[in-house]
Amino acid sequence: MNTKDKQFFRDLGERIANARKAHGLTQQQLADTLGIAQQTMAHYEGGRSKLPVSMLPVLSQLLTLSFDELMGKPIAQRGSKHGRMSRLQQQLIAIERLPRTKQQFISKMLDTVLGQR
């Protein structure tokens, strides 16, 4: 692996580890869900092994990350056609990253607020 590839896989592994921790999952729990060994997961997160491309959609869904987020595309580049993202768009992206229970809580709050029109 050349230096650029090594850095890419280290960064990808770090993003996966951060998202996994944000969801309160251990490496073992994520590895079990993916059907791989915990050591393999540790190697992916540490950038010591190349992550199979076929695993990216599954990780994206499990960790509630968009493919762009998983690949490390800066948020500013994911804005609307007319420039920067609005605060609401940024908040929606942040909510997508939250664990399911927190997303449900926010959804209930929004239902309550929007129902008061």
Image (cartoon, grey):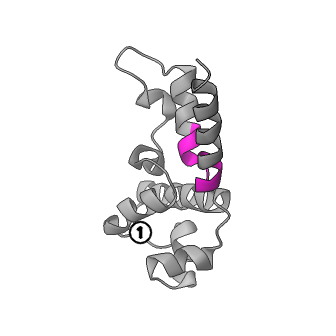
Task: Determine crowd level at label 1: few under 14, some 14-19, many 20+ residues with C-alpha closer than 10 A.
Answer: some
Q: Residue at x 61, y 74 (%)?
A: 27
- Report the span colored magenta: 94-103
Q: Eyeballing the image, is 2 above or below 36?
A: above
Residue 110 lies, with reference to residue 6, above or below; the image says above
* Residue 23 found in image quarter: bottom right
> Residue 81: x percent and y percent?
34, 19
Residue at the image position 60 percent from the left and 62 percent from the top: 20
- Type of the residue with mark 1: Leu
User: Magenta stretch: residue 99 in it?
Assistant: yes
Q: Residue furthest top?
A: 82
Give the residue drawn at x 47%, y 83%.
36
Judging depth in this view, the residue of 14 and 85 nearest the camera is 85
User: SS of the residue at dot 1?
Assistant: loop
Image: 48 above or below 115: below
Q: In which quarter of the image is residue 22?
A: bottom right
Q: Is residue 44 left or right of residue 53?
A: right
- Image coordinates of residue 29 in percent, x first then y, are 59, 77
Query: Residue 83 location, x and y as percent?
Result: 42, 16
The residue pinned by badge 1 equals 51
Closer to the camera in the image, 37 or 96:
96
